[in-house]
Amino acid sequence: MRYQPRGELLTREVTADRKRLLQVMTNLLSNAAKFSPEGEVVEISTEEAPAGLRVGVHDRGPGIPEAFRARIFGRFNQADSTTSRQKGGTGLGLAICKRLVEMMEGHIGFQDREGGGTTFWFELPRHA
Ligand SMILES: Nc1ncnc2c1ncn2[C@@H]1O[C@H](COP(=O)(O)OP(=O)(O)OP(=O)(O)O)[C@@H](O)[C@H]1O
Ligand SMILES: [Mg+2]
């Protein structure tokens, strides 16, 4: 697995709580790494959004099952109940991400990725 920036390497600035922002990035990147097939690339993107900054983490993992989508940001929720045994984790990472992003007055979500996999994204106001 490799991390790779997507698009131009532009510097984008946001004023945010360093610890919260790092925790959100850590959780999203660790999921992308954990659910990626061996040797796949995880891409990271940043773009200007109407309300501020949008960060994307794009993987080539298995995607999010339809039946799990509504619960994915809930606490202790995992798509596959054997995940915690196979891949580790407690099902708390995304619940924490959502909480932290919302504390910073931002939004978090995910979408299917063209060609397979998932994009998790969050948006933060310029001064979060
Ligand atoms: N990038 C992803 N691709 C596929 N499924 C994902 C991805 N990210 C999260 N999931 C699904 O959502 C579940 C919840 O993710 P979450 O980060 O909250 O918990 P976890 O990674 O299992 O454990 P923890 O984050 O507490 O170590 C995962 O167990 C997995 O089923
Ligand atoms: Mg996680």
Image (spheres, rainbow, N blue to C red):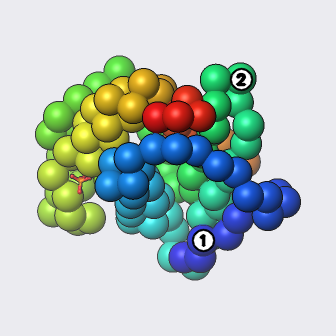
Q: Residues within 10 Å of mark 1 (few under 14, many from 20)?
A: some
Element carrying mark 1 = strand
Between 33 and 61, the residue placed more toward the observer is: 33
Q: Looking at this rendering, what residue extends furthest in the right direction?
A: 8
Element carrying mark 2 = loop
- Amino acid at the residue labelled 2: Pro
Between 98 and 104, the residue placed more toward the observer is: 104
- Amino acid at the residue labelled 1: Tyr
C-alpha span from label 2 to label 1:
26 Å
In the displayed structure, 76 sits above or below 39; it is above
In this orientation, does residue 96 appear? yes
Residue at coordinates 52% horizontally, 55% vertically from top-left?
Answer: 61
The answer to whether 82 appears left or right of 49 in the picture is left
Residue at coordinates 67% horizontally, 69% vertically from top-left?
Answer: 4
Mark closer to the observer (2, 1)? 2
Residue 2 at x, y percent in the picture: 59, 76
User: What residue is disc 1 on?
Assistant: 3
The answer to whether 107 appears left or right of 84 in the picture is right
Q: Residues within 10 Å of mark 2 (few under 14, many from 20)?
A: few
Residue 21 at x, y percent in the picture: 41, 50
In this orientation, does residue 24 appear? no
Between 64 and 24, the residue placed more toward the observer is: 24
Mark 2 sits near ligand 1, with its Cβ under 8 Å away: no
User: What residue is disc 2 on?
Assistant: 50
Residue 62 at x, y percent in the picture: 49, 51
Residue at coordinates 47% horizontally, 28% vertically from top-left?
Answer: 106
Task: Name the image quarter holding residue 22.
Answer: bottom left
Q: Earlier in the sequence, mark 2 or mark 1?
A: 1
Task: Name the image quarter holding residue 69.
Answer: top left
Please count the marks in the image. Answer: 2
Mark 1 sits near ligand 1, with its Cβ under 8 Å away: no
In the displayed structure, 1 sits above or below 100; it is below
